[in-house]
Image (cartoon, grey):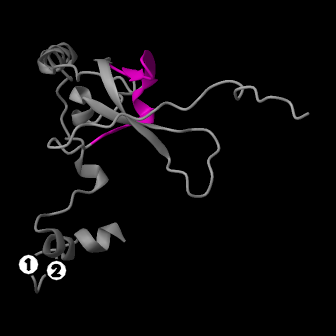
Amino acid sequence: MLGLRTAPKEDLQSSSAELVYGQPQRVPGEFMPNTTDPWPAAAQRASLLDSARVFAPVPTTQHGVPTSPVPPGLRSAGYVFIRHDAHRGPLQPPYDGPFRVLEHGPKHLVVDIGSRPEHVSVDRVKLAHLDVTQPVDLAIPPRRGRPPGQPAPR
């Protein structure tokens, strides 16, 4: 089949492969030249080594070190909302706040919650967009522990 496509046609003055590809097609017998000269292995080895020295190594990447996408506005936020991860009722909002930010870290914030600083992960907070013309009403933190004791009924 390869011989039929590479054989020149007398009426076209070219082969069918040459009409399709725009140049004559090489057959396996034409890849190696028919020379009786000995192969210059030392010269070709030196040429290949010179070519290999020119190549620069490709810089490697670190796929195992994930970068944390922290929103740019969160790095300089003054007030944030904190996601409430516990069970909540049907109409309870998912975030508590706003709370004042005391310090910014690479992956955490120090937030003033009820007059005590707490470290909160960046994954749990959302930037609070507040009206600058109004005073900020800080949220009262939820109570922790047991509810206050009630007098026993008599």
Residue 51, image quadrant = top left
Pick the front one: 38 or 82: 82
x and y percentages locating residue 54 in the rendered image: 11, 19
Pick the front one: 67 or 106: 106
- Tell me the residue at 35%/23% (across/down): 62
Few, some or many residues within 10 Å of mark 2 (<14, 14–19, 20+): few
User: Residue 125: within the magenta?
Assistant: yes
x and y percentages locating residue 109 in the rendered image: 36, 21
Question: In this figure, which residue is indicated by the disc labeled 1?
Answer: 13
x and y percentages locating residue 29 in the rendered image: 28, 51
Q: CA distance from mark 1 to mark 2?
A: 6 Å
User: Residue 137: within the magenta?
Assistant: no
The residue furthest left is 13
Pick the front one: 131 or 43: 131
x and y percentages locating residue 6 in the rendered image: 23, 68
Few, some or many residues within 10 Å of mark 1 (<14, 14–19, 20+): few
Numbered tag placed on residue 9 in the rendering: 2
The residue furthest right is 154
**Mark 1: which amino acid?**
Gln
1 sits left or right of 74 in the view: right
- Region in magenta: 106-128
Does the residue at mark 1 contact the one at mark 2 (Cβ under 8 Å)? yes
Q: Quadrant of the N terminus?
A: bottom left
Residue 70, image quadrant = top left
Residue 30 position (above or below residue 149): below
Residue 29 position (above or below residue 125): below
The residue furthest front is 154
40 sits left or right of 80 in the view: left
Label 1 SS? loop
